[in-house]
Image (cartoon, grey):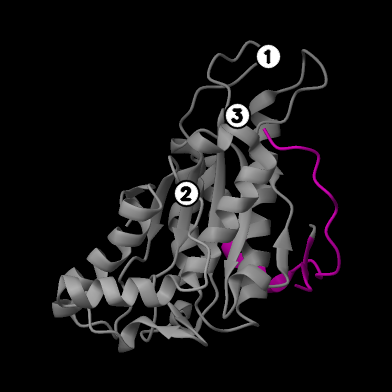
Amino acid sequence: MNAHHSGRRPRAARPARGLRTPLRAHATLVAALALGLAGCSDPPWNSDDKAARKVPCGLVVDGSGSGRSDDTGVDVKKKLQETLIHFLESRNCSSLAYAPVTASSWTSSCRHSPVDLDPTPKSSTTDRELLRQRARNTAVNASVEMLDCARTQNGSDVLGGLGRIARTLRETQDDAADNASILAVSDFEQTDPEFRISRQPLSTRTERTRAVDKLLAGRELPALRGMDLYTVGYAKNPARKPSTYQGFDQFWTDILTKRAKAHVHHDYE
């Protein structure tokens, strides 16, 4: 597995450096996700498959404190277990790229090369679906490594994580990136050294516009135009009061839908 702690079809990926392959620490999650693979109900694929995977996909994982597996945050690892395989299958993902959410997501050293989820069979007798299942296992392991790396860097620059995954897809998928699907496993509680959403008044349109402009000041708007963004854990932080949800949601709608022109879905919540 090629990931490290240092800072439609994809091009040849450069080998990543440095991160040790997780063993016992990830056994439970990987085993649970593998069950999801075994339980897929799709018919067998062969070399004449007409439903070839064509959608480049991306995964954003939140390594902040709010993503812990206790009652003080969203259990990101559990959310991955419940949704990643279903997302890959339902979106017909041809590849999966990765980005972390950390205190500074753009510059985070957590990296992993995109995984090809629809590898070309080397012979007519090769079981194509078996190749795909192996590729999805590789993608699952990579998601766990990315999460563990992100958790060592704290913070929650959600905007940066979305910007980074969008750029990765643009750079590796060319024009196909316009049809990409992204799964963002995060509560979207933007908390970085320069901006904390929990401290921003968001009740009125004027307050939200001021907060959005403050967050975007000096930052790059994520290049999400035309992409489908699926959220998991959105606004699920137990510390967020129900009465603040509407302002929170409209804040992100302004950024992601109105400005970045993404198609935002909450299907996997």
Q: Residues within 10 Å of mark 3 (few under 14, many from 20)?
A: some
Q: Amino acid at mark 3?
A: Arg
Name the residue rendered at 51%, 47% in the picture: 85
Residue range of the region highlighted in magenta in the rendering: 3-30
Magenta stretch prevailing secondary structure: loop
Name the residue rendered at 53%, 83% in the picture: 155
**Which residue position holds label 2?**
224
Q: Quadrant of residue 37?
A: top right
Q: In 3D space, how far apart are the residues under numbered discs 1 and 3 (Cα atoms)?
A: 18 Å
Q: Amino acid at mark 2?
A: Leu
The quarter of the rendered structure image containing the N terminus is bottom right
Q: Amino acid at mark 1?
A: Ser
126 is higher (above) or lower (below) than 94: above
Q: Quadrant of residue 22?
A: bottom right
Q: Nearer the viewer, residue 124 or 201?
A: 201
Of the residues tagged 3 and 2, which is closer to the observer? 2
Of the residues tagged 1 and 3, which is closer to the observer? 3
Residue 117 visible? The answer is: no
Q: Nearer the viewer, residue 28 or 91?
A: 91
Residue 174 visible? The answer is: yes
199 is higher (above) or lower (below) than 60: below
* Residue 74 colored in magenta in the image: no
Q: Nearer the viewer, residue 180 or 42?
A: 180
Name the residue rendered at 60%, 29% in the picture: 8
User: Residue 239: horizontal and vertical position, in percent?
Assistant: 29, 86
**Which residue position holds label 1?**
47
Residue 8: mark: 3
Q: Residues within 10 Å of mark 2 (few under 14, many from 20)?
A: many
Q: Earlier in the sequence, mark 3 or mark 2?
A: 3
Name the residue rendered at 70%, 49% in the picture: 138
The quarter of the rendered structure image containing the C terminus is bottom left
Q: Earlier in the sequence, mark 1 or mark 2?
A: 1
